[in-house]
Image (spheres, rainbow, N blue to C red):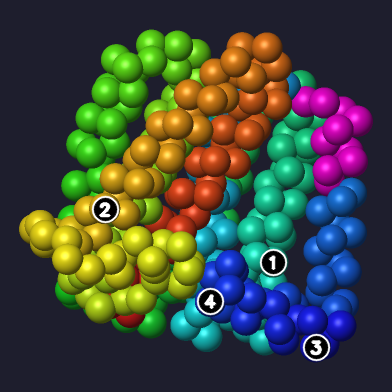
Amino acid sequence: MTGFIAALGGLPFLPEGTTLPPVPYLVAVLLAGGGVAVAFRRRAPEVSAAHVLGLVPWIALGAAFHVLYVVGGLPRPLAPLGGSPTVYLATGTLAGGVWLGAEAVDGGDRTPRLLAAAGTSLLVPVVAVAVAGGVSGPGARWSAVAVVVAAPVAIGAWRALVRINPAVGVTGGVGGLVVFAHALDGVSTAVGVTQLGFGERSPLSRLLLELGGLPSVPVFGEGWVFLLVKLAVAGVAVSLFVPYVRETPREGMLFLGFLAAVGLGPAAHNLLLFTIAG
């Protein structure tokens, strides 16, 4: 088992730094995650766009916790839970438990707001601990630039997608979140590599960012290709899920939420890491 854990990060298709925690932590996280998944399936709580949007602070929480892990800012008992992908499973398990608890107590009416409030109440102190160790001026500025640039890029991409395929409107705010999440990931990654000298851990993303012979543009450098690919993939994914959202909205919204998390998690990680270590 130890050899498998050590070799995991060396697999070519996994991001650098991919690790598994010690066996007791791994077993505990898997059991907890499995328990919440079974309970979620049995209770079948309502899943709407509002519920998925309520998970946004939880996505950012997992990313912020991982940043503390990267910079060595976690207490020793919690450190094994901060590695990737363990941190995302642990955070998802906690969010699922809170979701089920809120549903049981409230009956479902205020569950999205309670879910968002609980995630935010945990996210704020984690971010505060991260920035308490110091803030990088250039990193904070470029993080702000990434957010400011990503917003109109995402709005333009979403409008173009709706014009090309009006049916994507059925995905509502969650579809828009998917596009924004991947736009922010694309912009922040390009900015981090071009302006701050950070590397990209994902092999496929690194391949796109290291393409030679491309013209450089302001802010993005040669990373504009990576951004375009991210936007294209997000648009295609949202379009493919339109029939699924129509026929089985509950599962369709959950899967769209997962697609949003795949972009928003790395983006939030980038922004916080740049801010404190850029």
Quarter of the rendering occupied by the N terminus: bottom right
Image vertical order of residue 201 relative to residue 267, above or below: below
Which residue sits at x=23%, y=30%? 156
Q: Name the element at disc 4.
A: loop
Mark 2 packing: few (<14 Cα in 10 Å), some, or many (20+)?
Answer: some
Using residue 157 as the reference point, say whether residue 243 is left or right of it.
Answer: right
Which residue extends farthest left? 218
Q: Name the element at disc 3.
A: helix
Mark number, residue 16? 4
- Tag 2 and tag 4, C-beta contact below 8 Å: no
Which range of residues does the magenta coloring cover?
36-45
| Mark with earlier residue (2, 4) | 4
Using residue 58 as the reference point, say whether residue 214 is left or right of it.
Answer: left
| Residue 28 x, y percent position in the rendering | 86, 67
| Mark with earlier residue (1, 4) | 4
Residue holding disc 2 = 225
**Residue 73 or residue 259, whichever sits in front:** 259
- Tag 1 and tag 4, C-beta contact below 8 Å: no
Residue holding disc 1 = 86
- Camera-near label (2 vs 1) is 2
